[in-house]
Image: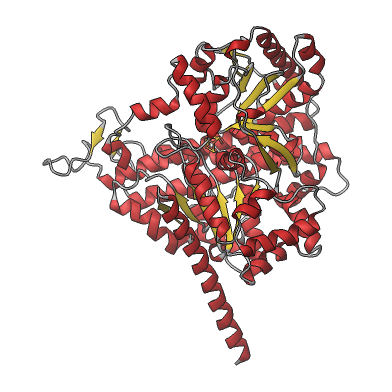
Amino acid sequence: MSEYKTIDVAATQMLDKAKEIGFLSTFDRAKAQEPRCTFGNTGICCRICLQGPCRILPKKPGGNKGVCGAADYTIVARNTVRYIAGGAAAHSDHGREIAETLLHTAEGKLKDYQVTDVNKLMYVAKNIGVETEGRDANAIAKDVANAALAEFGRIDEAEELTWLKSYAPENTLNIWRKTTVMPSGINLSLAKLLHQTHVGNDSDPVNIIFGGLKVALCDIDGQHLATDLSDILFGTGVPVVTEANLGAIKADKVNIAVHGHNPLLSQMVVKAAKGMQDEAKAAGATGINLVGICCTGNEVLMREGVAIATNFATQELAVMTGAMDAMVVDVQCIMPSLRSAAECFHTKIVTTSPIMKIPGSYHYAFDEHRAMDSAKEIIRLAIDAYKTRDKAKVSIPNITNKVVAGFSLEAMLNIFKKVNPDNPMRVIADAIEAGEIKGIAALIGCNNLKGTHDQNHTAIAQELAKNDVLLLAGGCSAQAHALAGMMNGEAVQQYAGEGLKKFYARLNAASGLTEDLPLMFHMGSCVDYSRMQVFVNMLAAEMGLDNSEVPYVVSAPEAMSEKAVAIGSWNVAYGNPTHVGVIAPTVGSQLVNDVVTKIAEDVFGGYFFWEPDAAKASARLIDILEERNWKNVMRKKARDAKAAN
Ligand code: XCC
């Protein structure tokens, strides 16, 4: 057992090294923050105006409300939805950048990008109602990109978001319309939510929560278009075999980590590196080695098979190896402390986005007009840094695990098609209806050092697999499983229950892949979670169910970011029971907490539950799946009986 809050052996080794050299990592900082302020922890600290901070002090006369009179439920609701706004802004702005790049590509303004996946372009165009007949790919791409950009600026509230409207099932759309959470424009909804939660504005907690859900639906819209347009530009993931953990950093190579979320630059770095191996050799290395961290890592893993170095909580530890020559970062989930870690070594931290700079690090303003040149210049920086690497400071944990990843929805359907060419989704529906698998769980989200790094991600996955639950994964959760050696066929043999094993055996026999399928299907970065939702939408249609009746659950055992709050919220609106492994800052108001954990089910079919204990969380997730299956069997019996009469 590690003396640190991680289950990862490689991370433990690097934390020992950090201790030795006196570097205080995020693990030390997390400890230093304890104990947390109860007001902040439970969501009853209001910092929305300058009269604050106000806390709820029920025992003091006048203290049970903020200075303006806001009660606990107003404060908690406002704080919660402002998390959603932060998350939705991040995801959708990411999507907007990809849409602009696709537009400029289609207009012939960018020499380094092109429409790579024409099939995906056609599929998306058809779905969102863009004419494809007899038209050239760039003309279609231009219309698709413009449709994506139109999502942001739309101000006519009578119009609905195109992606949401085109992919969500009609009954779900109708619930959203009835509850007035169906958004029209992303920017409008975000602005309205910030307005709604301004001091002296809305104090009705339910109305505030519904405003938040509208923005959460903007979050999935922005995510969805980001994924679709990234696939069009860079290709849709196909199964790849690679490795994960800090041992993927190689002592004899120029090591470059790509970290963050947006693939626009990292894809170019991967491409450029292929042609620059000789430059690295001229500097004395045996070549260039790329590794990924967080979701930029997931993007290039899915499409290019780039190895995973590590995930969110342990990003500093990639620098601690002493062999990281450059870490190229774009946006989101990049710890400012990387700079301090780099100071202990020769590592260059290269920031590339105008909205993500770290004081003291190297800023290289990425320009999409000269994307390839930018990538080459950044790689040369890494090669120069390599020349100054102090070999005496290098110690790379000798730990890597085999990873089978790259499961876009298209890749998964291709595998199911091998079993059932006419109706691939039937493969899953049959397995559920026959009781071979209990249902599906999406394992998602971040790391959160309120718990132990990666412990609950892996424990919950193992318990669900043992109980014949088919697993999807993404974000840092997927990376947790990959780092722990659970994302390969061997893990199926080790952890899966008999039903799940049988299901896998059938898929493996038909798949035509050289590798057995892994214990969880890694569907991509956190911006890619729409892939999972489309999967559920298709399964619901195939099984003749409403979305909220599908035996499907979501688990974010170590949720951390505002994006995770936004993601959890749209999952609830979509009808998905959603586990969060940290106690959410909604508990400061019984009313708000009840709305999101209980009442939500009556309205949307989905709801949150908070459970930091992995065993209890797994048991509840399994119960939910069993209950949904039981209800579906009962419904079928009732239908059959009616038909027989
Ligand atoms: Fe960030 Fe996407 Fe969370 Fe990981 S999972 S810590 S948001 S990198 Ni999305």
- Which residue corresponds to the image point at 73% horizontal and 41% vertical from the top-left? 144
Q: Is 136 situated left or right of 628 in this image? A: right
Residue 76: image quadrant is top left
Q: Nearer the viewer, residue 37 or 347?
A: 347
> Which image quarter has ligand 1?
top right
Give the side of residue 529 with respect to residue 516, left or right. Answer: left
Q: Position of residue 452 (x, y in %)?
A: 44, 38
* Residue most extreme to the bottom: 645
x and y percentages locating residue 338 in the rendered image: 52, 20
Residue 563 coordinates in the image, percent (x, y): 50, 39
163 sits to left or right of 410: left
Outermost residue, top side: 388
| In front of the other: 25 or 111 | 25
Quadrant where the N terminus lies? top left
Give the residue displayed 75% in from the left and 44% down from the top: 239
Residue at position x 60%, y 92% from top? 645
